[in-house]
Amino acid sequence: MFHQLKLPTSNTVGGVSTGNTADLPILFHNIPFQSLNDEAMQTLFQEVTDTAQAELTLRGTANVTAKTAIGNVPIGDIDFNVPTFLGGMYLHCCFLAC
């Protein structure tokens, strides 16, 4: 584990599940990662800096409170494993001879 992301509580509307998989869209921005291993994070950022795009996996657990007709129902430790991409800062230089 390289980092941790603590998101504030927010309202969202998800799909209905009766034991099946249901989407729960969660959007966030401008939330800083908390480094749990500074050396590993430094290595990650060095590698991402030297590439146009890096593939990452966001993996962990989430807790939600479902607002239902019978009241609020807390649901904890929901596993997630989501592939995503992080844009790098790869610089491509080209020199032309005159």
Image: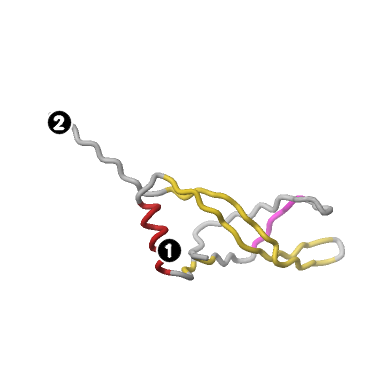
- 87 to 41, vertically: above or below: above
Q: Secondary structure at mark 2?
A: loop
2 or 1: tag closer to the N-terminus: 1
Question: At 49% from the left edge and 59% from the top edge, which residue is drawn?
Answer: 30
Question: At 42% from the left edge and 58% from the top edge, which residue is drawn?
Answer: 44
Question: At 57% from the left edge and 67% from the top edge, which residue is drawn?
Answer: 6
Q: Amino acid at mark 2?
A: Ala
Using the image as rendered, state which of residue 50 and residue 17 is in the foreground: 50
Residue stretch rendered in magenta on the structure: 10-15
Using the image as rendered, state which of residue 33 and residue 55 is in the foreground: 55
Q: Is residue 46 left or right of residue 6?
A: left
Which residue position is annotated with label 1? 41
Which residue position is annotated with label 2? 97
Percent across and percent down for residue 94 are 24, 36
Q: Amino acid at mark 1?
A: Met
Q: Residue furthest top?
A: 98
Query: On residue 11, which mark appears?
Result: none
What main secondary structure does the magenta stretch of the protein show?
loop
Question: At 35% from the left edge and 49% from the top edge, which residue is drawn?
Answer: 50
Percent across and percent down for residue 14 are 73, 52
Q: Is residue 67 left or right of residue 25?
A: right
Tell me the quarter of the picture where residue 66 sits.
bottom right
Tell me the quarter of the picture where residue 68 sits.
bottom right
